Image (cartoon, helix red, strand yellow):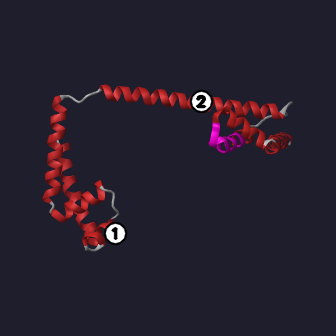
Amino acid sequence: MTQARDRTDAAQGIEGVLLANRERILRFLALRGAGDAAEDLFQDLWVRLSARSTGPVADPLAYVMRAANNLMLDRYRSARQSELRDKAWGESAADQKPSAESALISREQLALVEQTIAATGERPARIFRRFRVDGVQQRDIAAEMGVSLSTVEADLRKVYAALAALRRQFDAP
């Protein structure tokens, strides 16, 4: 019972320091490069510190400021790692060019997809392109083409079924 009470008192002490020094901590985070994210980082700091089970802290404000500094260091490291990972991936992806054979196969498959869509009919093909390529909502397509929403849905199902059958052909050994 005493141990649980000590944890509660410590959490209230840290939370009290966070509340009393909120503006100071936000300024510190902003000066360290948090910018508009200072509020979010303050919330992260709050969650981290109130979730920890700490004993009595000799200088709670210094403890909180050190935790805020560590949070910013974690953020910088994470951003740096992400940047390096993205750069490495971008370079490796740019270096990898498809072989002539795979480029030819891809062009042939694209031609088959276009033929399959066209074979479903003019209206279903147009509805499919408006919905999947142009990003127009189904109800707007229905109004634009003067058909019901259920007709748009039926035409989309027709194209999807044809494409699914073609995909099965591609996947077959």
Give the numbered dot on residue 139: 1
Percent position of residue 92, x then y = 35, 26
Residue ID at (18%, 45%): 110
Residue ID at (28%, 74%): 148
Viewer-proximal residue, 149 or 58? 149
135 in relation to 37, above or below:
below
Count the labels in the image: 2
Whether residue 173 is visible: no
149 in relation to 112, above or below:
below
Q: Name the side, left or right, on which 171 lies relative to 56.
A: left
Residue numbers of the magenta segment = 34-46
Give the labeled residue for mark 2: 76
Give the numbered dot on residue 49: none
Q: Quadrant of the N terminus?
A: top right
- Location of residue 151 (image quadrant): bottom left
Does the magenta run of residues contain 44?
yes
Whether residue 116 is visible: yes
Q: Name the side, left or right, on which 96 lies relative to 84.
A: left
Percent position of residue 116, x then y = 15, 54
**Between marks 2 and 1, how big is the CA–CA gap?**
46 Å
Please, what is the three-letter code of the amino acid marked with disc 1?
A: Arg
Task: Tell me which label, 2 or 1, sits earlier in the chain.
Answer: 2
Disc 2 crowd rating (10 Å Cα; few below 14, some 14-19, many 20+) is some
Percent position of residue 125, x then y = 20, 60
| SS assignment for the magenta stretch, majority | helix
Which structural element holds mark 1? helix
Answer whether labels 2 and 1 touch (C-beta < 8 Å). Answer: no
40 in relation to 69, above or below:
below
Does the magenta run of residues contain 65?
no
Residue ID at (50%, 31%): 82
Percent position of residue 86, x then y = 44, 31
- Location of residue 70 (image quadrant): top right
